[in-house]
Every structure is written in C-alpha cells, then in structure tokens.
Amino acid sequence: MTVAAFIERHDLWSSDQWRTAEDVAKKYSAENLKVLRLSFADQHGILRGKALITDDLLETVKNGLSMPSSLLAKDTSHKTVFPTFTRDGGFDVVGMAGVADIVMVPDPTTFKVLPWSEDTGWMLCDLYFPDGRPVPFCTRRKAREAVEALGHDGFNIMAGLEVELHLFALDDAKLEPHHAGQPGEPPAVSLLNQGYQYLTETRLDELGPILNVLRKQLAKLGLPLRSLENEFGPSQIEMTFQPRAGIGAADDMVLLRSAVKQICSRHGIHATFMCRPQLPSLFASGWHLHQSLIDPKTGANLFVSNEKNTHLSDLALNFVGGLLKHARASALFTTPTINGYKRFRSYSLAPDRAVWGLDNKGMMVRAIGQPGDPATRIENRIGEPTANPYLYLASQVYAGLDGIQNGTNPGSPSVEAYESEADLLPTSLMEAVSATKGDQFYRSKLGGSFVDYLVKIKEAEIARFLSEVTDWEHREYFQLF
C-alpha cells in the first residue's frame, strides 16, 4: 500500500500551492539546479534550515523536512533558554520536550533561485508537528492569522519596507579558535565612506560597487526594490521597496536580511542590520513600516480621504488610533533588542512617544499623502531593522484592526513630536517586556502561551546583558543581524 506524502496526508497545501509546486519543479529541473535550501524564520526572524542535494524538487518537498525543535528555544546568542529535557520547563506544553522533531513544510509560492549560490534554489517553510498540527511558535503563522483576521472584516493590508543598515569593509572576521563563543567575537571592520553628507551623489557613488551588486542580485530574487541610497551616517544605506499585500512584505524582509548578508560576505563586506553598532560616529538605523488597508475585491486604497481638508479617511484615523493605543505593548515586537532602544532619542528622526502627525518625521506615526492621493498611507517609524518581520506586521495589524472595530479616535494630528503629552514609548527592552507581559490585548490575539514564550526568551537575553560587561550589545547583535 502506498503511503501518502506528509503534505498530502495532512492536507497542508492549497490547490494553488500544488499547482505552483508543479511549476516550480519544472523550473528547478529546467535550470539544472542541484541544491534546495529549505528555511524557516525563527522567533528572532533569523532564517534556519538545511540544504538538500536533489534532482527532483517535488518529491523532495512533499514530505517536508524534520528539524530539531530546540531551535525554537534559543535566544540571540543561540543558547537554549528552555530546559528541553524536563516536563516542568514550559516547553513540553506543545510537545517539544526532549528536543523532539518538528517538520518544515515548504511554501512553493516563495521559491527563489539564489543568484549568488551556484545551482541553488530556496523555499521558505512553515512549521508543523509530525502528526500534522501547526507549531504554535511559528511566527510566520502568527502573521498569517493576523492578516486573516483583517480579511474577516473585509480588509487586506498593503505594507512597504523602508530599511536602514550599515555596510563595512571586513578587515578581520575573527576566526581564530579563541574568537568563537556564544556569541562569538564580532568582526573588525572599517568604513566604506565617511558619510554625513546626506544623499550627496558623490557619497552615493563611493558605495557604487557594492550597491550595484546588491541591486542586481536583489532584482534577480524578485524583491521589489524601489530605491537604494546613502543615508546620513558613514557607511549607512537605506533601501525602500514597493508595497506588498498580506504577509508579502514580511516574507521579503526575512529574505532581504539574509540575502544582503550573504551577498556582501562574498564581496568582503560585513553588512549589519544591528540598530546602533558600537563604533565611533555612527548613526542608528531604523525600519519604518508603511501601511494602508485595501479592499480585497477592488484593490482600492481605503486610507484615501475624499474630504478636501482631510488627509486620512475615517478608517485610517481609527487604524492610527489603534496603533497609538497599543504602542507601548507592541514595542517588544517592533523593537526586540536591548540595542534598539538606544535609537529612541528626543529631537531626532526617531520617536520617543506614541504620537502622530502629518508628514512629520519626528512622529511615531507619520501620515503621508494629500486628500484624494491614491498613495495615501501611514508610516510607523518605531521599528528597528532586527525586528522579526512577522511579529512586527502582526502587531500592527491587530492594533490597527482593534482601532477600527472600536472606532478609536487618535485625536488631532500633533505638531509637536517631542513636546506632546502622549504616552512615552518604552526606554529599554526591560520596560518593553514588562509592558507586553501584562498586556491582555496581545495575549488575546497572539495567545498567552506565545507571549509567555517570547517574554521568557527576551528575559534570558536581558539577564545575560545584566551580567555582562559594556561591550555585550556589540558581541550580541553585530554579527547576528
């Protein structure tokens, strides 16, 4: 008797995914690919997976691929936070005690050919237990559930990425045995340019060789790159992307971060999405998430105002109201590292309180567009580039939808980004964890066990920070992100 493959047995692909998988398999064969990387985004948004050597993509992926569940128990140093071999450690509640296997199930709609890696294809995966149940700590699923909640109310989200990062010449990768550790010694680097001359063409041209490589490779990946420019600080750049519907922008972000680091590494460049590296004269990097809601049937932008003197529709205003209402509790999802809170400074281009305004870059939420403008959107400027894209997106969707459902009024747009009486954002990861831990709203949306799980991981990170010397952040994030 023939036993059905894992995906078929548990009905884990839609009819569209099956059709796509067949098309992908033909492309894989036609391009004579030999390596298939299967990856999932972990709790930090870092891609983990395996590379399979295969000539037959479809037969390879139909059964998924097993992975150790302990990967979901790790903090940013890759140390296991949960006692996985005991039942009282909190990890067995979902059946992962003893480092039991989980299964990566590829999503064929995410297939890419990696232009920098010879004969290599790539797919993003979702996580399931061997009995077909979804793993509750899969953050991609959390984002999909949030978008589905929007759909129940007749909306879909359009999200666009605006991401800052640093590129450095790699002087010393620190590969002597004594440099290894959890985390390892961060690499020694030097600047690619001195910077400060914001958007100056000559400074942009100094970065031209590596930026041209990135532009070409990202285009081959199908990432919707819109602009690639030099930012204010030395060796700092910004990338912006065309908006994508649903979880598309989050999928793009996990691939972008991994791709940029891999491409740059092959050219002797260290790319880091760490918010504020511990190097002289650098400026913090942010991740601004542009958002609007659309009608799934017509594609119409529901944030557009048809009133002459109003920049946002009533729906958009309620969405903004929800973002402001839940800003403190959502900070753990938008700014999940100790380092990220070094960016929140008054009278800078980063917010320090939950306030909104019209085209004001000091606000947490910036409204963009004029009355009747089809490109009308809001930009949340709270995020850091290391945020898990799925949790960032989910936190925005749930907060905004709550604002719509409850008719939350954000008040009049502020003209004082740093002088208003609005709630201050958390000033540290410790404060953010506390705000999320006691927040019933995100517990109800993401699940209490998931919030407890994420909080425990971040508390372990905080505990290590408090026990380390002052270069802890550099060692922790500079290489990882």
Image: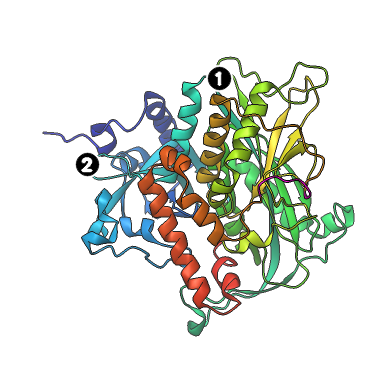
Can you tell which quarter of the image residue 292 is in? top right
Task: State the SS at label 1.
Answer: loop
Q: Tell me what residue is drawn at x 60 percent, y 39 percent.
A: 325
Amino acid type indicated by mark 2: Asp
Give whichever of 336, 280 is nearer the camera.
Answer: 336
Residue 301 appears at what percent x and percent y?
66, 22
Give whichever of 333, 72 is nearer the camera.
Answer: 333
The residue to which callout 1 is attached is 296
Name the residue furthest bottom.
178
User: Is 271 covered by the magenta stretch?
Assistant: no
Residue 59 appears at what percent x and percent y?
31, 39
Residue 40 appears at what percent x and percent y?
43, 49
Give whichever of 434, 157 is nearer the camera.
Answer: 434
The numbered mark at residue 131 is 2
Given contact means CB atoms under 8 Å apart, are the residues at marks 2 and 1 in contact? no
Amino acid type indicated by mark 1: Pro
Q: Tell me what residue is drawn at x 79 percent, y 64 percent.
A: 234
Q: Residues within 10 Å of mark 1 (few under 14, many from 20)?
A: some
Q: In the rendered view, would you say 467 is above or below 284?
A: below
Work out whether residue 54 can be spotted.
no
Give whichever of 198, 303 is nearer the camera.
Answer: 303
Q: Tell me what residue is drawn at x 52 percent, y 52 percent.
A: 435
- Answer with mark 2 or mark 1, whichever residue precedes in sequence: 2
Work out whether residue 343 can be spotted.
yes
